[in-house]
Image (spheres, grey):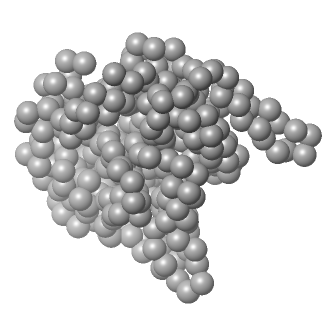
Amino acid sequence: MTDVKLFSGTASRYLAEKIADYYGDALGKVSVQRFSDGEMQTVIEESVRGNYTFLIQSTFAPSDNLMELLLMIDAARRASAGYITVVIPYFGYARQDRKDKPRVAIGAKLIANILEAAGVDRLMTMDFHADQLQGFFDIPVDHLRAEAIFIPYLEATDMSNVTFAAPDVGSTKRARNYAQHFGTDLVICDKERRRANQIEAITVIGEVAGREVILTDDLVDTAGTLCRAAQAMMDKGAKSVRAICTHPVLSGNAYENINHSVLDEVIVTDTLPLKELSPKIKVLSVDKLFARAIRNTHENRSISALFVNKESKTLFNNL
């Protein structure tokens, strides 16, 4: 079988090292030289000829992280790598998935085009902002679900009085998946927003009085929506409010917003590095899930077997 080589960009090395460790192999050697004008040069310092090559890098800000990944892809392709898979735990620009106003770019589609033009054969990622982003690519996309991380964690707690809630209409499907898995109720927040990162009002649709509410979302950015939704739940009589969010973007005043909110806990993954610590933020690692997905890809085994359902949940928990 063709050898596997794992490489990491500088921004995601903290996670890539854990993925490689669980996979049972060391990260390959990559050097990044920065010139005085800010230009980068990426060098893969070992042979990848004919190998299954996995390049691990999330594409969060600054844009240098995306550029570094593109240079790694080009270096691997020009070094005759047999099959190139980019592992992007957090896919930046995913929120720019449509034209919601005149003369605006569809950033997610542009990034998809750029990755394919660079020479990628496959994409592995987690929790797109919208599932339909998979259709932006003409290459295979392995779209992993953070449910495989969050559900075992929640199952170890008392779920007898829990109601799941979507902080906005766009998160309804995700919240419904959790509600159906645990056989509990679903509540939806309808938010009115006049401009990005600024909310005018939130209306809670459903009953939360006396319930322990868990808000679900794919990412938490400034945490404005999350904290306003949590307050709205408490105002409606909720007993407590927690949140599960896959990607901790946490920009602007996010940490301050969370620390001073009514939220008891915000559970996130390590697809992005935290900028600072908070007593209210708990991080669960995606290292084992990505390592298993990489192995299954190399061995031509099912990726959907890693999704949480009646058949696969036990398999994942036994990793």
Lateral position of residue 156 relative to residue 12, left or right: left
Q: Position of residue 10 (x, y in %)?
A: 65, 31
As drawn, 178 above or below 114: above
Q: Nearer the viewer, residue 28 or 129?
A: 28
Quadrant housing residue 247: top left
Residue at image point 34% right, 22% down: 1
Q: Is residue 198 visible?
A: no
Query: Residue farthest to the right?
Result: 36
Lateral position of residue 33 relative to residue 79, left or right: right
Quarter the C terminus occupies: top left
Residue at image point 55% right, 27% down: 48
Q: Nearer the viewer, residue 45 or 263?
A: 45
Residue at image point 52% right, 34% down: 81
Q: How many marks?
A: 0
Q: Is residue 192 visible?
A: yes
Residue at image point 48% right, 79% down: 100
Q: Nearer the viewer, residue 64 or 233?
A: 64
Lateral position of residue 265 relative to residue 257, left or right: left
Quadrant housing residue 40: top right
As drawn, 100 above or below 227: below
Q: Nearer the viewer, residue 24 or 285?
A: 24
Q: Position of residue 241 (x, y in %)?
A: 32, 44
Q: Position of residue 165 (x, y in %)?
A: 26, 54
Q: Position of residue 226 (x, y in %)?
A: 42, 53
As drawn, 118 above or below 56: below
